[in-house]
Image (tube, helix red, strand yellow):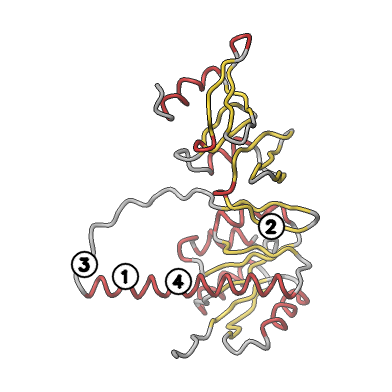
Amino acid sequence: MPETKTMHIVIADDELLARQRIEDLLAHDPSVAIAGTASNGPEAVAAIRKFAPDLVFLDVQMPGMTGFEVVAAIGADRMPVTIFVTAFDQFALKAFEVAAIDYLVKPFDDERFAQALARARKTIELRQVERLTKQLATLLHESAAPEPPKRQYLDRIPVEQRGQMRVVPVSKIDYITASGPYAELHAAGKTFAVRERMQTLEEKLDPAIFFRLHRSAIVRLDRIDILLRASGGDYAVRLKDGAELPLSRNRREQLEQVMGKG
């Protein structure tokens, strides 16, 4: 059995106790090595560039530069696998967008930390396989002309439930409705509140899968059963689970075209 490759880690957090907490949790794992630590944003950038770690634990709010500014300085495509660590859960969605493989809200317990570390380790291993595959393709002269980069859409959305953060897979979402200035995700009979506006979510979801029916509703296209015309000339759609959602008149024709009915 091949020897496990050591995972080199940088810890960036302006709180000494927070850095020590992560160091203590890693201390008994022989497959990891702490390459360096940082107490502010500029130090984090320097440590990442100097040590080229496999994994970074990155605080969102630090003196000098925020965690997001650190990512921007390094470049999202050049960032190591990243786990954001912060006491402020409102940054979760942005964290997943820019680089994060996971997001820990302080104070986190040992089990939650272990889950994040395992997810990071798996991602690092997959990246290593991808690099080896690309190297082999180059050696065999099988490299094809590069395809234009595809736009990245959300595949999971972090939500807060009973004081804890959890992740809702986008593949499980049936529809989304407005709730004041925010939104509610409806997935498999459950409802999850998320601190994002409908317009923001619409822009981050794959338009081949989701459709904005109305200012207050976004639906997964394959969940639609039938288009309805209500009294007074209003429109709606009925989903396969029986739920009905409003459909704006100016979006009806576009929906029919998308569904192949136009």
- Toward the left, the furthest residue is 141
Q: Are marks 2 and 3 in contact (CB under 8 Å)?
A: no
Amino acid carrying label 2: it is Arg
Work out how far the residue at label 4 is from the one at label 3, CA to CA, in angstroms: 21 Å
Amino acid carrying label 1: it is Lys
In the picture, the disc for residue 134 is 1
- Tell me the SS state at disc 1: helix
**Residue 170 left/right relative to 104:** left
In the picture, the disc for residue 87 is none
**Residue 48 left/right relative to 261:** right
- Name the residue: 59% across, 41% down: 174
Q: Nearer the viewer, residue 106 or 173?
A: 173
Q: Nearer the viewer, residue 119 or 58?
A: 119
Work out how far the residue at label 2 is from the one at label 3, CA to CA, in angstroms: 41 Å
Q: Which residue is mark 3?
A: 142
- Name the residue: 61% across, 67% down: 83
Work out how far the residue at label 2 is from the one at label 4, CA to CA, in angstroms: 23 Å
Amino acid carrying label 4: it is Leu
The answer to which image quadrant residue 144 occupies is bottom left
Residue 133 on image: x %, y % = 33, 72
Q: Which residue is mark 4?
A: 126
In the image, residue 230 above or below residue 197: above
Which badge, 1 or 2, comes first in the chain's sequence? 1
In the picture, the disc for residue 166 is 2
The answer to which image quadrant residue 55 occupies is bottom right
Which badge, 3 or 1, comes first in the chain's sequence? 1
Q: Report the quarter where the C terminus lies.
A: top left
* Residue count near mark 4 (Cα–Cα under 10 Å), binned few <14, some 14–19, many ≥20: few
Work out how far the residue at label 3 is from the one at label 1, CA to CA, in angstroms: 9 Å
Amino acid carrying label 3: it is Glu
In the image, residue 56 above or below residue 211: below
**Residue 236 left/right relative to 21:** left
